[in-house]
Amino acid sequence: MWKNYFKIAVKNLLKRKLYAGINVFGLATAIACFVLLALYLENEWTYDRWYKNVSEIYRLRMDYGEKGEKPVQIALTPNILATAIKDLPEIQKVVRVYHRDVSIQYDNKSWNEKRFIYADPSFFQLFSFSLKAGNAATVLNGPDMVVISASMAKKYFGDTDPIGKTLLINGKRSYQVTGVAVDPPSNTHLRFDFVASYSTLQFPERWGSANYYTYVQVQQPSQLASLQASLTALARQQLSDEERSSGANLNFVPERMADIHLHSVAADLTEQKGDIRYNYIFGLIGGMLLIIACVNFMNLATARSTERSREVGVRKALGAQREQLFWQFMMESALLTGIALGIGLVLARLLLPAFNQLADVQLQMSGAGGYRIYAILVVVFFLVSFVTGIYPALFLSGFKPVQVLKGSQTATPRGRGIRQSLVVFQFAASIFFIICTLIVQRQMQYIQHKKLGLDRSEIVALNGFKGDVQALESFKGRLLQLSGVTNVTAAAESPVDIQGGYSIDHIQDRPESYTLNINALPIEKDYLKTVGIGLLSGEDLTRADIADILSEQSEERKYHFFLNETAVRKLGWTPASAVGKRMMLNGRTGTVKGVMKDFHFASMKSKIEPIVLFPEYDWFQQIYVKTGGSDKQRVIAAIGALWKEVQPAIPFDYHFLDDDFNRMYKSEYRVGAVLGVFATLVMVVSCLGLLGLAALTTQQRTREIGIRKVLGASVTNVVAMLSKDFVRLVLIALLISIPAAWYIGHQWLEAFAYHAALSMGLFLIAGVLAIGVALLTVSLQSVKAATMNPVKSLKSE
Amino acid sequence: MIQLQKISKHYPVGFGKNEILKDIDLTIEEGEFVSIMGPSGSGKSTLLHILGLLEEPSAGAYLFQGERVDKMNEKKRTQLHRGAIGFVFQAYHLIDELTVYENIETPLLYKSLSGSERKSKVADVLDRFNMVAKKDLFPNQLSGGQQQLVGIARAIVAEPRVILADEPTGNLHSDQAKSIMELFKQLNEQDKITIVQVTHSDLNATYGNRIIQIRDGHIQG
């Protein structure tokens, strides 16, 4: 019997190629997307959760701030913290991690490496990275030792054994390779290429600077409360009496390792953080696509009921029982689902590289995640077969034979209400996703075009300059001689994303104990001019100002500060009155040289905060070259040639400030791109269903169309008549989806301190688009029917 | 074999009802060849459907081989379809997606016969109707007469006790109609199958041994 069901199912599919094609194609697309999104989510959910003992591992966060202010929360802590806590009874192991971009020389070649970390000896015991060579307990237990990843071993040493070889770091010190680690998987924020021993750094241990990640393994997760109490007490000891009396806060808070990727509130520089909301959206899209494809299936199957009712009637008269017909229809669903599943898997495999690029991930169909996907797909197969089969099977197998067999009269199509509701649902979902995509794109455009208060265009940033003031000045002079270079400056950080946290005190006209937390950036003389920051009062730096801060003894230096409008306002000054005021920035005494117009130095998600720029020549890591003229490639080639001459040991490595800026919105761009693609697919699959329905409606109304034409209806009349019903459904869908999309979009935009407005135009575009696409889809069928010769269509009855 | 006692059938129409059959008493013996005749709308097709258990009477009792069937549940009724009743339709009602062979095989599938049994029974019928060469064709590749031949083959393959035929030659021209009617006669005489046909044609009615005239829901005479 089953063989027979299968045979009948195959025949039915072959007989109705359009119908089967729509179903298979729609379902295959949905399954391909489902697989890709499931792989993506699988990667997200397992992020950092695969470590052995992960429930015992925490990263310490530092919270600090003034009384009554929302504390700043960062994942970076002072290096002495690890020493201070390592003997607490709750603690099993402590590991500090310090990130640094380095250049590495080996065998007369050099590379810049960004995934280079320094870590305490128990790194490979706390984190379950496996070592291909070397002993986890000893690989980092002395200075100048480094463990490299397997792919780096291949890159630097090819097939020779790397153990015992030495790498020259930053042209200064040689590190000996003591171990080779299996490449870390993509689903961890600790994706290193190199782990060097922390003791190499020989940094003094102090509370004053927080540049280190501190990871701990606790004895018992249940002891978290007592650990927290110890940490809070420890933090409190570090505050001065004055700070304590003014109500300043400092605390260290353990964050679960497993929660860092999706739930950490701390600012984190290591890896792109995940966002639980985007995971929900992607999950929603994956599920929605499957549901919509299933809906197509059910709709088309029941809409074809007229056609199949005769078969049901005949079979029943020949002795078929309802369950036998039920299983026959279920078999058809299962067969279609099976074919779609196969095609969908192939599609997913083909599209995986493109998806990886789009979503900026490295997913694989094989591997642990992949196998779990296949298990899920088996469940999906049965679920989809069941869902798509159950309604048509119950519906069709319930026909009474006599209704069908009485003469030429056929059963009138039923289930129209359900079908229409399902179409409304499909279109509401498509329109919802389209509006969401439009909102994300509108915000990205807003960010791109918003006046930042500085000019980031055509600025090339050169990384890793090494040299003293003279070397810098001479390099700068030679750069300026190149044609196409208009300005040159240097700084520690990119002006579009300044992260240095400082505080100012000993402020003129203010009580001794007053401090203001402020962002700050050491700059070179021509900085303001090069990046185009405007001054409201005061003057730009002169050579004489620079001479004031070049002294080796920091006590002798006289600093010059540039505050932004926001900082001046916070201090209760006006731009005019601020100039010349005395203040102290983390021990640097000086006066206010000028007041800058506010500019965006961080993501649009946060309001512009106080910032101070000050010349200080000890920290420059990047040189910024403002270029003009059209031939960008030539200018960069010239800069590169000059770099090789001046800095032969360091590879020429450059990027544009625009890249720095765009990187801040990477996850938004990513979600925008993914949403765009999948919203389109949701629309396409919905339209496939509409196409099928329109084809069937038109076919069922052939006789009616013929009669109307004989009675004088024009082609336009007929097309309008056939399209009207569908357009009405899309309009209802629009009314449902707009409020939902408005609400979600509003929530999303609220996360940005500066955001585009939600305009009516946006919804209008989505509405016109949806109706347009629906009309086009329906007209593919209706025009054909309307132009048919009525004599023919009447004869066919 | 078939006994109808005071069978009535009516459909609700608006607030009233439309009486199709009124107090029909009818007995058909095993081996008879009965023709039901009457003008359009007289209720003859409804009577046939009731005989075939495709429709339930509104009132009255129906005994098939001495068993009350009008109150039977769907499952038992289906058992009867399979074992005892074969249908032939005016519009043939072959399944378009299936070949001649598969169309004939279908009733056997629902009787849960084994593959080899099905094969031999279908082969017998094909052989008897001289359709072996056409077994792999689809219905739309056949003429109307040939399609009805398949319809009859399908009706008898499960070896029913009675064949109910609803204007079996209504869509055929006279030569084809003649051979179909002769086939029915042969089935009746050689195979002892009881046949009840609805027909408009006086000529066709002569093939049978009893004529029942029906008018306005009543049996005449």
Image (tube, coloured by chain):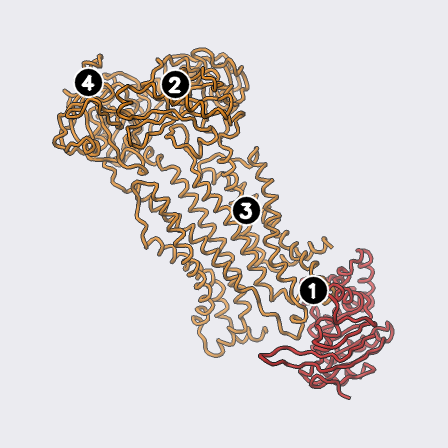
Chain colours: A orange, B red
The residue drawn where x is 44% and y is 22% is: A227
Q: Which residue is mark 4?
A: A549
Q: Which residue is mark 3?
A: A31
Disc 3 versus disc 2: nearer the observer: 2
Disc 1 versus disc 4: nearer the observer: 4
Q: Is residue A268 visible?
A: yes
Label 1, residues with CA under 10 Å away: few <14, some 14-19, many ≥20: some
Q: Residues under labels 2 and 1: Cα distance? A: 85 Å
Q: Quadrant of the N terminus of chain A?
A: bottom right
Q: Is residue A521 left or right of residue B154?
A: left
Residues beneath discs 3 and 2 located on the same chain? yes
Q: Is residue A152 above or below residue B217?
A: above
Q: Residue A78 falls in which quadrant of the image? A: top left
Label 3, residues with CA under 10 Å away: few <14, some 14-19, many ≥20: many
Q: Secondary structure at mark 4?
A: loop
User: Which residue is more in the foreground, B129 or B18?
Assistant: B18
Q: Is residue A683 above or below residue A728?
A: above
Residues beneath discs 1 and 4 located on the same chain? no
- Chain containing mark 4: A
Q: Is residue A518 left or right of residue A12?
A: left
Q: Which label sits on residue A81?
A: 2
In the rendered image, the residue lying farthest to the bottom is B221
Q: Which residue is mark 1?
A: B138
Amino acid type assigned to the residue bearing label 2 in the image: Leu
Q: Is residue A647 visible?
A: no
Q: Residues under labels 4 and 2: Cα distance? A: 32 Å
- Place of residue A471 in the rendered image (x, y in percent of width and height, measured from the top left): 25, 17
- Chain containing mark 2: A
Circles 1, 4 touching at the beta carbon (< 8 Å): no
